[in-house]
Structures are given as structure tokens and as C-alpha cells.
Image (cartoon, rainbow, N blue to C red):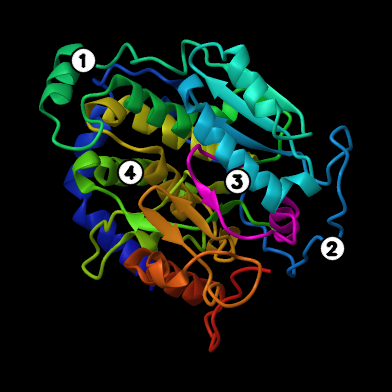
């Protein structure tokens, strides 16, 4: 059934695919990964092991060897210090004071001594500060500046006029995982300033993901503001037409489509994500990012890292490798996710009555699609967390 639906999708977008293939030769972007036809087997097909939860949550020494090489990572500015301190205080209280995983912060300018001191005051864990290189924080040379300036001056969506926001989305999509400070990591947990963590974590999510063969973890899914990504899906379809062998055998791609087979804009909010970095470092993901980068949509439109990460996870990972952390209560300005019954029991302090994303279309659709793929004969919901 999935193959038949996929063929219908390809036929529907065939004119776009042909145009995209021809346009690729005149766009002016010469990234090697885009020019090559990838012919290797999919490398993310491992079946998850039986659920195993880390039982040892004794406090780790800051210099101790962690069971998983991981860190809490953020792209931030010096002006984010207060909001970041609030985030770190909560993460320390809820999880990291027991584990002492390092923090990594990167910026397009040097961090001030005030910023460094303000962060280090809150944790015993090691804290590393880095700066971005020119390649990862620029408007690429193949972008037509006249067209780009026109887009910025006429955009009718949030941050539409900003260079920095587009550079940020491009960096988070294709460069953060390649920063030298992350070179020795196997996993990262992305954090941001001015967010709230409501639940004590009585297990290690890095160990949980590693032992269960999980590659991507999320906890908020929402439809994207489509005005920012009008051609992202068509560009993705073009890439798939050229590299269909890269699709995972049990992918979540139906999650991305509505009942009519059109792109629905569903995406995981990447301000919270826990990721096995072998996924982002893979030739599959790199080729996909390079293809999108050459298309120019990070600048001619305002493609966000959240839909880019989400589409990649849905297409190139098996459904069993994508995990919904529904047990982590979390607030990012304007959106709250809170475990059920948290008002009256458990170690979360949040109002589940104000949490609407669990019942939203993108979350419900994810659970339905994953259940149908992972357990074809399931009569009970798929296990979502420890």
C-alpha cells in the first residue's frame, strides 16, 4: 500500500521533478554531494532493541566518563544570558545535576566574560564556548542578492526581513552538528533560552535512545506557517525522485501528507530535540541538506530548521527510530506540552488542561502512522516512553 501511494505521489509531482532536475544544472551551486548519484544502502535500518532504561542515576562527576557521549547544545547570543540562565537552572534541577553532561554554546561573535561567568555559575558540568566560521554563517554566493533583497522587503511573515534569522535556520539545519565542539559527541540535546522544563527526569534520555536504537526524539509537533516554505515540499519531492533508494523502508512519510496526498506542513519543533548525531552526519542527510541549500529556499523563502529536520527524519529514518517524549513537560513561548494528570500526581508541575498539542493534528497523526508501521496488528497504543 505504501509503495502504491508513493507511486501516486511521484506521478502527481512528475512535472515538478523534471523541472527541478533540469534547473539543478543552472542554479549555480556546485556542492559535490548534490551532483553525485548516491547508491549506497540505507544505514538506519537497525531494529530497536527491547526497551531498556538506565537504572543508574547516581550523580556523575563532571570529569567522569559518561555512558553516552552527549551534551546540551545551543546557538545563542550574549543578549540571551538571562533567558539561558533560567533554562539551565531548570535543566540542572530536573536532570543534569545528577549527570553533569557538558554544555556547548556557540555564537556568531565572541562570548563576553559576563556571559561565560553567568552560565558557569549555575552548573558543575563543563561548559564550552565556540564561535561560528564564515562558511556556516553567511549568505551563499549562489544567492541572487537582488531577488533576496526584494524577498526581505516584501515578506509578510515573522522575521521575514531578517538576515540573521535565515542564517540561523540554515546553520541549525546543516552546520551545528558539524561544529568542531560537537565532533566527539554521539548525541546532542538542543536547548534554548526562555523555555520551561516541568518534570523531573528519573532516567537518562541519551542512554534510553542509544539502547533502543532511537535516532530522533521530539515532544512538540505543529503545522508550519506555510508562507515561509511554499516550495520546500516540491524541492523535497525533486530530491526523492533523484534518490528514491535513500527512503527508509518503514519511513514516516505518510505523516507528512493529508488525506488528499498533499503536504500538510507537520513538523517537530526543533527547539527541543534529542538526536543521534550519526543521522545528521550521514551522507543521506548531508546530500539532502546540500540539495535544499542549493535551491536557495533558506533565503528566497524562510525555510526553518524544524521542517527540514522533520522531513529528513520522516523520510530517511524508520518509524521505530523516531521517539515522542510525551513524558517531558516543556514550554516554549506560546506553546505548552504537559503529561496527562500532571495537575494532581507525579513529578511534573504543569497544567495539562492548558496543553493542547497532544491532541493536535500533527501529534495524533504521528501516533497513528507510527503505530500502523511499527505494529501492523496493534490493538494497544505504541509504547511512547519509559
The residue beneath circle 2 is 55
Residue 386, image x and y in percent? 68, 69
Residue 97 in sight from this viewpoint: yes
Callout 4 crowding tier (Cα within 10 Å): few <14, some 14–19, many ≥20 = some
Label 4 to label 1: alpha-carbon separation = 21 Å
Q: Which mark is residue 144?
A: 1
Whichever of callouts 4 and 1 sits on the residue coming sooner in the sequence is 1
Q: Secondary structure at mark 4?
A: helix
Label 2 to label 4: alpha-carbon separation = 41 Å
Q: Secondary structure at mark 1?
A: loop
Residue 219, image x and y in percent? 50, 58
The residue beneath circle 4 is 236
Question: What residue lies at 74% left-to-right and 65% top-to-bottom?
Answer: 49
Q: Which residues are magenta?
A: 189-212
Callout 3 crowding tier (Cα within 10 Å): few <14, some 14–19, many ≥20 = many
- Choose top left, top right, bottom left or bottom right for residue 363: bottom left
Whichever of callouts 2 and 4 sits on the residue coming sooner in the sequence is 2
Question: Can you name the residue that lies furthest to the bottom here?
Answer: 379
The residue beneath circle 3 is 275
Amino acid at each position: 500500500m505504501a509503495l502504491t501511494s508513493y507511486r501516486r505521489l511521484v506521478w502527481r509531482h512528475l512535472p515538478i521533478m523534471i523541472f527541478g532536475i533540469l534547473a539543478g544544472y543552472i542554479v549555480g551551486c556546485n556542492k559535490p554531494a548534490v551532483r553525485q548519484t548516491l547508491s549506497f544502502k540505507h544505514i538506519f535500518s537497525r531494529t530497536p532493541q527491547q526497551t531498556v532504561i538506565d537504572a543508574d542515576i547516581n550523580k556523575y562527576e563532571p570529569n567522569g566518563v559518561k555512558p553516552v557521549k552527549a551534551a546540551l547544545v545551543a546557538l545563542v547570543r550574549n543578549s540571551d544570558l538571562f533567558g539561558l540562565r533560567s533554562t539551565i537552572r531548570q535543566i540542572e534541577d530536573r536532570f543534569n545535576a545528577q549527570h553533569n553532561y557538558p554544555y556547548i554554546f556557540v555564537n556568531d561573535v565572541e562570548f563576553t566574560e559576563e556571559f561565560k561567568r553567568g552560565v558557569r555559575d549555575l552548573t558543575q558540568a563543563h561548559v564550552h564556548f565556540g564561535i561560528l566560521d564564515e562558511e556556516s554563517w553567511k549568505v551563499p554566493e549562489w544567492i541572487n542578492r537582488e531577488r533576496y533583497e526584494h524577498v526581505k522587503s516584501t515578506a509578510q511573515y515573522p522575521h521575514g526581513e531578517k538576515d540573521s534569522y535565515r542564517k540561523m535556520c540554515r546553520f541549525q539545519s546543516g552546520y551545528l552538528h558539524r561544529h568542531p565542539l560537537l565532533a566527539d559527541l554521539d548525541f546532542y540535546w538542543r536547548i534554548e533560552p526562555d523555555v520551561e522544563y516541568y518534570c523531573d527526569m528519573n532516567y537518562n534520555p541519551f542512554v534510553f535512545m542509544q539502547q533502543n536504537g532511537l535516532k530522533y526524539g521530539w515532544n512538540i509537533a505543529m503545522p508550519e506557517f506555510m508562507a515561509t516554505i511554499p516550495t520546500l515540499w516540491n524541492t523535497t519531492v525533486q530530491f526523492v525522485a533523484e534518490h528514491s533508494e535513500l527512503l527508509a523502508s518503514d519511513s514516516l512519510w505518510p505523516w507528512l501528507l493529508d488525506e488528499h496526498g498533499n503536504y500538510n506542513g507537520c513538523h517537530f519543533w526543533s527547539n527541543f530535540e534529542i538526536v543521534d548525531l550519526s543521522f545528521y552526519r550521514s551522507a543521506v542527510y548531508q546530500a539532502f541538506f546540500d540539495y535544499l541549500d542549493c535551491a536557495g529556499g533558506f533565503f528566497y523563502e524562510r525555510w526553518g530548521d524544524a521542517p527540514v529536520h522533520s522531513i529528513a527524519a520522516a523520510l530517511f529514518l524508520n518509524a521505530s527510530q523516531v521517539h515522542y517524549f510525551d513524558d517531558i513537560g516543556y514550554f516554549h513561548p506560546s506553546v505548552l506540552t504537559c503529561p496527562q494528570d500532571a495537575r494532581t500526581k507525579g513529578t511534573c508541575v504543569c497544567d495539562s488542561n492548558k496543553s493542547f498539542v497532544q491532541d493536535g493534528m500533527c501529534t495524533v497523526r504521528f501516533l497513528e502512522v507510527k503505530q500502523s508501521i511499527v505494529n501492523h496488528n496493534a490493538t494497544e497504543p505504541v509504547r511512547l516512553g519509559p
